[in-house]
Image (tube, rainbow, N blue to C red):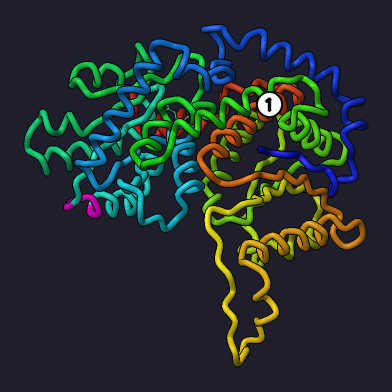
Amino acid sequence: MIKTNLNFTNLNVKELSTLYQKKVTDINNELEANAKNEDGWLGWINFPFAYEEDIIFQDSWKRMKALALKLQKEIQVLVVVGIGGSYLGARAAIDMIQGLFNSTAPVKIIYMGNTMSSTYVRQVLSYLKDKEFAINVISKSGTTTEPAIAFRLLKELLVKQKQNKTVVNSRIIATTDKTRGVLHDLAIEEEYESFIIPDNIGGRYSVLTPVGIFPMMVAGINCEEIIAGAQLAAKACKSDKIDINQAYLYAVTRYHLYKTNNKAVEILVSYELQMQMFCEWWKQLFGESEGKDGKGLLPTSVIFSTDLHSMGQFIQEGSKMFFETVIKVKRPNEDINIPIDKKNNDQLNYLTKYSLHDINNIALQGTIEAHSDEIVGKTPNILLEWDTMDSKMFGYASYFFMKACAVSAKLLGVDPFNQPGVEVYKKKMFTLLGKK
Ligand code: PA5
């Protein structure tokens, strides 16, 4: 479902295999050998099969499904309260699969707890005032400040609105650790319906766990297909061979461009506005996994052709510290033809033989050629060819990038699963706030 095409990079699979196959085989052996460990952070490797094979997650799936169907009848809005890995995956999936102006989704999903902007928070609260809503509060640690503040405010609104503890508590769903944390304890005390985040899966690798799946189910997404796609990817990305495993080919190519060609920045390019949040999810995955010990590629993103009118100039002619990774979608979720206009005053009739998606893909082709041109562009372009933007594709793509990311970070020699740097700002902030 994803093909890594190196035609616009000046690199080839054979050359990369000669340089990196041994290293990649060692990394793959290490990942596969430890994938079943309860300790550590590799639970995501086999997780796509957990809903069929693990009794706890079989039960989670049934409960999530039943509750999603019940909520779809009762509420207009689900507020997903979480930050970083606890909300980006669901948002990426819902936007990508349903698009930005979907009118058929049974429930609108909105997000809080991902910011401390008072204006944003006030506006969300006033938007919810006269709506039937539920809260899915998601935090593995259960102590993160942004979602904790948001949850307190939302709960206050729900209590005011419903005036009945049983109804209020039936509208709160907690997704958190199995045994620990403030949110876990609160969920037990208040008898909130709750779903588990496995111990051995970190936030940014958790999109296929109930963290991502429950909001997707409430949004009306076919999650069986999400998991089917992830299972396909888990099989396709198991081989250690760079010439077979397209995720590893992508990982090695970006590592090589960083190491050998001084390309310290990777720009992820999509030609679909509904992929903006997917790019945000990808940025968090690679940024938090790789950026440590003074190493790592800076992950950034653009949406073309939109950003060709803002960043296009820089990418074509500015300083050359970056390469591009371009996502090309073969089949769009929707397409439209350009109508013929008899008068042709806008001189667009020459486009009527194409659909809008054809034109978008021709723009992609022209832009890749311009950017990777050896004289006027000098920017290697890795092309990732995707079949679609549907549920199966999301499951596949999310798994593909998680596997690629783990291998990329290991090639750099950093731990893909910790984020010690995130604590530094927290310490400073808590000192300033006078937290004991
Ligand atoms: O990837 C990560 O681990 C982080 O981005 C976390 O998901 C984020 O900090 C939120 O943490 P928590 O789920 O504990 O509230």
Residue 82 horizontal side relative to residue 329, left or right = left
Kindly identify which residue carries mark 1: 236
Q: Position of residue 260 (x, y in %)?
A: 88, 36
Q: Start and end of the magenta stretch? A: 126-130
* Front-lying residue, 333 or 36: 333
Residue at 58% from the left image edge and 70% from the top image edge: 337
| Magenta-drawn stretch contains 127 | yes
Residue beneath the point at 64% across and 31% down = 400
Q: Give amino acid for label 1.
A: Ala
Whether residue 153 is visible:
no
Q: Is residue 171 visible?
A: yes
Image quarter in which the C terminus is found: top left
| Residue sitting at the far left | 163
Chief secondary structure of the magenta portion: helix
Horizontal and vertical percent position of residue 270: 63, 52
Q: Quadrant of residue 307?
A: bottom right
Quarter of the image for the N terminus: give it: top right
Give the total number of marks visible in the rendering. Answer: 1
Residue 100 spot, x, y in % from top left:
45, 55
Q: Nearer the viewer, residue 71 or 314?
A: 71
Rendered location of residue 237, percent (x, y): 69, 25
Question: Taking 346 as reference, is 242 left or right?
Answer: right
